[in-house]
Amino acid sequence: MDLTHEIEKRKTFAIISHPDAGKTTLTEKLLLFGGAIRQAGTVKGKKSGKFATSDWMKVEQERGISVTSSVMQFDFDGYKINILDTPGHEDFSEDTYRTLLAVDSAVMVIDAAKGIEPQTLKLFKVCRMRGIPIFTFINKLDRMGKEPFELLEEIESTLEIETYPMTWPIGMGQSFFGIINRKDRTINPYREEEKLTLDDDYELKEDHAIQADEAFQTAVEEFMLVEEAGDAFDLEKISKGDLTPVFFGSALSTFGIEEFLDTYVDYAPMPTSRSTKAETEVEPTNEDFSGFIFKIQANMDPRHRDRLAFLRVVSGKFTRGMDVTLARTGRKSKLNRATMFMADDTETVNEAYAGDIIGLYDTGNFQIGDTLYHGSKVEFEELPTFTPELFMKVSAKNVLKQKHFYKGIEQLVQEGAIQYYKTLHTNQPILGAVGQLQFEVFEHRMKNEYNTDVIMEPVGKKIARWIENEEAITDAMNSARANLVLDRHDNQVFLFENEFAMRWFSEKYPEIKLYNLL
Ligand code: G4P
């Protein structure tokens, strides 16, 4: 059937990585491969100033608050692949985490010289919680890095996931010769055209000087060891995210990308089903259109109030102008203005299928987590809240503006832009965020949309922990180093000064059961 056929063609993923590992470069090379762009240097404003920009994005970039997170679609081998950008660096925010709730698989890019870095670990945990397949691309083999076995060992021990190398590197840096493709035992040379092949005895079929090379011999021995003693291939484990296929390459030199893509499309899942509040599952091939909003891109230009809501299509087919219902309010509307992002252009979408992401122009009707549907009613389960790490006391500069101030906070909190806490007895508002950018966006939007200047006073980095048995809390436990506050549902939360303060607290009060959100 047409619908099923379209949906089976879709693969939707995000790249998880630490800044500088090569996410942008890899994205660009994938798009080049898919023929979606004609030249490199098109992705992300950082270097070329030319990205999938629309007017509001340009405004943000001029202001230095680039919140550019986009979705790009490209074709490869008959598949439609959607890449969702996960903003890092100073753009890191809850949106980065939430993007991972809208994908069916993730690609983890690791810098071979650096191994697992903090941001990779944080994002990895969200993927793990969702049990989605994770593919690993070890990048920058054209430079000296850690030994391949050391990297695999680091992935396995730090991330607690099994590894299955799909390719194996021969040398690195200056002496990088190429990669062995495990699937067919061909060797793709880095600096030469002709591929070589290993026979069953791990000998080169072709006559080539490299055979005598020590680095080559070592790599082949390692490869042998991987085949004999490494984790077994297990598609079931891959699909649950318990085993990650690993690739080696150099994104900058477009090397190892084809091997990666070939395998990715074979093993990455098609769009998956999603749970509803009523504890049912909506299958992607369900005839009725449904989807949920995982990100709202605020317009930073005060002259234009409209925002862009990113919707992941969960089931069925979207067609332009279709009637949809917003599950939270029951309100019906026509979706006339939807966009999809291509590498150097945004396009009006006429149709989209389960797995795709569409951008909806919004004048303030949507909230993060909202369900839109056509036909019989569905409402997807709520999106999780992430444990914030940064905190800021906030107040209105002008006390006469209190009403605007609280209205603004309420809306921005509901929208998922920022988290709201308050001090225990004095009810002084405290904002929580996973990235500094969220505070900047908050301040800017309060001024522009709610006409309120705010005073922000950093509380700094804290470790937030919720409490299972609140009734056991006593006044004596509340201190500057273990500060008790309330979240927006009036649950008590400890903000610990640091790891040490938290450990000290747990030893002193073992009866208090602490937990964190994701
Ligand atoms: P990010 O999005 O993960 O932050 O990383 P990005 O792709 O921007 O890459 C970070 C830096 O690493 C860039 O260098 C990029 O050229 C380089 N890089 C990416 N892949 C490879 C690779 O396979 N090998 C090598 N040697 N370098 C790689 P930069 O100096 O920051 O930028 P540029 O001046 O080179 O553009």
Image (cartoon, grey):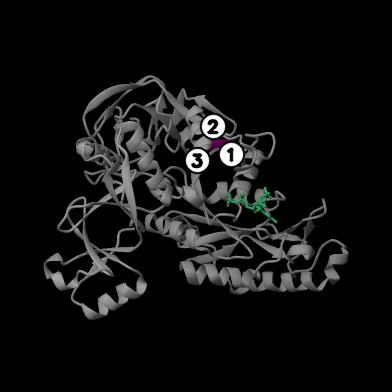
Q: Residue at x 65, y 35 (%)?
A: 35
Which of these two is toward me, 139 or 91? Answer: 91
Q: Secondary structure at mark 1?
A: helix
Asked if labels 1 and 2 touch by Cβ distance under 8 angstroms, the answer is yes
Q: Position of residue 49 (x, y in %)?
A: 61, 36
Residue in front for this viewpoint, 130 or 141: 141
Q: Assess disc 1: are there few (<14), some (14-19) or many (≥20) residues with their C-alpha within 10 Å of its C-alpha.
A: some
Instruction: Please name the residue that numbered disc 2 is placed on.
Output: 53
Disc 2 is placed on an element classified as loop
Q: Is 405 on the left-hand or right-hand side of 77? A: left
Residue matched to label 1: 45
Q: From the image, give the main secondary structure of the stretch colored magenta.
A: strand
Residue 291 seen in the current view: no
* Residue behind mark 3: 66
Indicate which disc, 3 or 1, sits on the residue closer to the N terminus. Answer: 1
Q: Residue 44's image quarter?
A: top right
Name the quadrant containing residue 322.
Answer: top left
SS class, disc 3? loop
**Position of 368 relative to 16 (above/below):** above
CA distance separating discs 3 and 2: 11 Å
Q: Earlier in the sequence, mark 3 or mark 2?
A: 2
Q: Quadrant of the N terminus?
A: top left
